[in-house]
Image: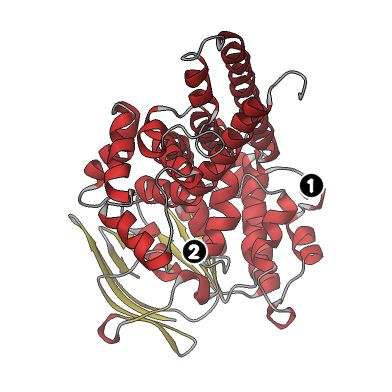
Amino acid sequence: MKADLTFKRGEFQLAARVELNGGVTGICGPSGAGKSTFLALLAGLLRPSAGTLNFAGVDLIDTQHGIFVPAWKRHFGLVFQNGMLFPHLSVRDNLLYGFNRLTPLERHLDLKTVTALLEIEPLLQRRPDQLSGGERQRVALGRALLYSPRLLLLDEPLSSLDDRLKQQILPFLKRVKEETRIPMIYVTHAQAEVDYLADRVLKMEDGRLGE
Amino acid sequence: MDSLLTPEEIQALYLSAKVALWATALCLPAGIALSWVMARYEFRGKLLLDVLIQLPMVLPPVVPGYLLLLVLGTQGPVGAWLLAEFGVVIAFTWKGAVLASAVMAFPLMVQPVRLAFRMIDPRLEQAATTLGATPWRAFFTITIPLALPGIIAGSVLCFSRSLGEFGATMAFVGNIPGETRTLPLAIYSYTHVPGGEAPALRLVYLSFALATVALLASHIISRRAERLLGYAGDRSLR
């Protein structure tokens, strides 16, 4: 993936030029540095002011040529800070929301594999409001994985959890990394998390991304 | 029912129900679309649009009714055109009663639906689009179900308001038995004829009963919808 993006909103400016090749890339930086904005740009939830984004040889963004592939066509998974599970759907229906949009050929993982990997089988019939914070994040991760994303974006997935829960979930993320081989971008302000998970770590400060 | 009400009264009741149902059906898609735009977008003239939507609630009802007559009457610019092009007459017909009721009840549809949309975190829709859902699909599978309690409340308020519509209907479509004489107009008519007190009172009781049942049904359905939608533990989405 090659990205060269700039984004301006009011006083805030983001400039990111980066080339990534699989594995887990950690992006570390303080709050307000622009980490979530960068992920939103990659996911297609925000339009950049200028720049290009190329994934697997295909242009997803090229502002000069008016190219912008919307979020629902990018096939990237995004795990939000607080899960963003759909409150009116059961855990099972949440997990299958993206999965059901895929053709059988596009499905690289199935419900059984993912629920076993994340140990969420006993939660399938529950509602999101009946889950603990840690369970919610595992379901959110499972939902993104079942969509068989080409790239998995994780936006501070553990920041709303206490240290004990973080220690419980980090091994799941490592397992996902090792067993699915889906390239990931993991955004956090906690250096310890990227040290544990990431193959490469980038820093983001004041809207600038660098090694 | 036959022994309790005269044929004229049954006719008024039937017409009221028909007009209120059609008015609600007319307000529902327009109300959802407009509430969505008002809840999610900032644009120039939004305040003015908001005032326009709310205006029928504070204007004397006869004013919108008279304006409708000026525009849609057979001598009015739109009414004359409809008659010449399609042979359609709206003024002084039950269709006009539907339109008058819809105009008057529209603000009551928009208020709760708009509030329901505002309570939904837009990131839920974003999450849906990152799972391959188009914005339309996200709207119909995430937003609409989550706004359902508000949509139900708005629909019932709209229906109830339409049942009670009087001033605008009277001004726009008159008081024609079997065509535009809804419950309130029938009550009004009975109070102006000798010996009309008893039927007027019967229709008053009936109006009370209908309004009470509608409001009770709205509360019960909304609560059920909230439970079904899993709002029990997440009050922030209410």
Callout 1: 10 Å neighbours few (<14), some, many (20+)? few
Where is residue A54, by image quadrant? bottom left
Q: Which amino acid does label 2 sit on?
A: Pro
Q: Where is mark 1, residue-wise?
A: A125
Check residue A5 in the rendering and tell me which mark sits there, or answer none.
none
Residue closer to the observer: A122 or A179: A122
Q: Which of A160 and B26 is in front in this view?
A: B26
Quadrant in which the N terminus of chain B is drawn: top right
**Residue A160 visible from this viewpoint:** no
Please say if B182 is above or below A146: above
Left or right of residue A125: residue B138: left
Residue A108, image x, y percentages:
71, 77
> Residue at 68% of width from left, 68% of height from top?
A99
User: Dot 2 surroundings within 10 Å: few (below 14), some, or many (20 or more)?
Assistant: some
Work out whether residue B131 or residue B211 is closer to the camera in this orientation and state it: B211
Q: Which residue is drawn at 27% across and 45% down?
A: B70
Q: Which residue is situated farthest in the front direction here?
A: B194
Q: Are marks 1 and 2 in contact (CB under 8 Å)?
A: no
Rendered image coloring scheme: secondary structure
